[in-house]
Amino acid sequence: MTITESSAVSRSPIQSQDQFACFATRQHHISARHLIHKIHMPVNQSESCNQQIADCFNHIKAQGYANPILIAAIPFDTRKNGTLNFYSEFNQTSPAHFEHNTASAGKTANSLIRKKSLVERQAFEHSVQTALSAMADKQMQKIVLSQATEFEFARQYSPEDLLNILIRQNPDAYKFMIPVEEDQYIFGASPELLLSRQQQQVRSNPLAGSRPRPTIPEHNSQTQTELYQSVKDRHEHQLVIDNIRHKLSSYCSTYQASEIPEILTTSTMFHLSSVFQGQLKADAPDALNLALHLHPTPAVCGTPTDIARDFILNHEGYNRHYYSGLNGWMDASGNGEWVVTIRNGLLNHNIIRLYAGAGIVEGSDAAAEWFETEAKMQTMLNVFQQQ
């Protein structure tokens, strides 16, 4: 049974072998199978959502499970239903142990039947120009616009096989495979930590400002230098950092943030990267509520937030759903890790939808931003080229 937007917490346990979930980092891999409760509801209803989360944890612990876990996916628009999965217990292993047990993941060829763009290039570039006009009128400072492409394959994909490939191809990213509604899975390899909380320690690693990683390694240094020295990209990055610092610092007794960004390298991209970390006050919210306080950051939405979000919903031309939302885990003590849902896809049996976005500020070029989204999508395309 599931919990709808208006219903109370279900007391009937769910038992399904198809509800595997995993969240994997460089340090550990968290996986769970025994799904006890599933809640579908908008998380912007904070009081009701927090109460239902507490009720679920308390009910599971009352059944004799000492270490329940929440593994969830939250959409970009938090007024829409998110998926909160509660598991009775979980396994936490080292990356080496996980890879040893999954090294034989299937690599069977799977032919592509259909490819459909949900946002055509012309429409994307038109939206960029419209956004730049709004910036010229001082309505916005930044906005993130995205595209999506749907692929239909000849056979159904195994969620665990896809996850195993993501882990091998993206060892430094945050990998995830999370069941959502109607037997669908959200999956991906996000480079961006929105927020982690471990006891009273909090950390965030926002990214903004990007360049595609060259296919010729000898060009890497030049590309990194161009990104680091780019006035446009440094401005875009600073908007995100200022937003994170403003929203998190009030919850901290002490904190520190990067004075200058560094370059973070993924399998396909270079990103400007900064770190915020602090000591939380005694009354600070749990990991999920802290993450929701940051969401959506200018890195996936824009600034001012409300104006940028409304522009996206009115002009982007498709429903982002979970893309550019957040996903991760939290235990009953409020510790957890939440990442931005980028470099991701939505798996629906043999149909897979992939997403990618680009930050638009004054000085952006519409064609260049389109090619940036194409480069970012390559992270996920690489998964299927290995099959």
Image: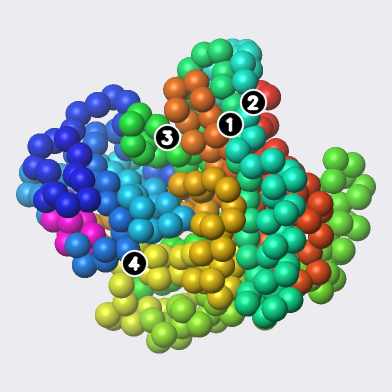
- Residue stretch rendered in magenta on the structure: 49-57
| First in residue order: circle 3 vs circle 1 | 1
Q: Nearer the viewer, mark 4 or mark 1?
A: 1
Residue assigned mark 1: 150
Q: Is residue 208 visible?
A: no
Mark 2 Cα-neighbour bin, 10 Å: few <14, some 14–19, many ≥20: some
Nearer to us in this view, 342 or 190 = 342
* C-alpha separation, residue under disc 4 versus residue under disc 2: 38 Å
Q: Tell which circle, 3 or 4, labels the residue nearer the N-terminal end.
A: 3
Q: Which of the two residues, 272 or 126, is positioned nearer the viewer here? A: 126
Q: CA distance from mark 2 to mark 3?
A: 19 Å
Q: Amino acid at mark 1?
A: Glu
Q: Amino acid at mark 2?
A: Lys
- Determine which residue is flagged by label 4: 289
State the residue at coordinates (24%, 36%).
Answer: 35
Looking at the image, do the residues carrying marks 4 and 1 touch, with CB atoms under 8 Å apart? no
Q: Is residue 246 above or below residue 162?
A: below
> What colouring method underlies this structural image?
rainbow
Say left or right for 261 vs 289.
right
Task: Tell me the quarter of the picture where residue 259 sits.
Answer: bottom right
- Element carrying mark 4: helix
Q: Earlier in the sequence, mark 2 or mark 3?
A: 2
Numbered circle sitting on residue 338: none
The answer to which image quadrant residue 242 occupies is bottom right
Q: Which is in the foreground here, disc 4 or disc 2? A: 2
Question: Is residue 134 positioned above or below 50 on the image?
Answer: below
- Above-or-below relation of 145 to 171: below
Alpha carbon separation for disc pair 2 and 1: 6 Å
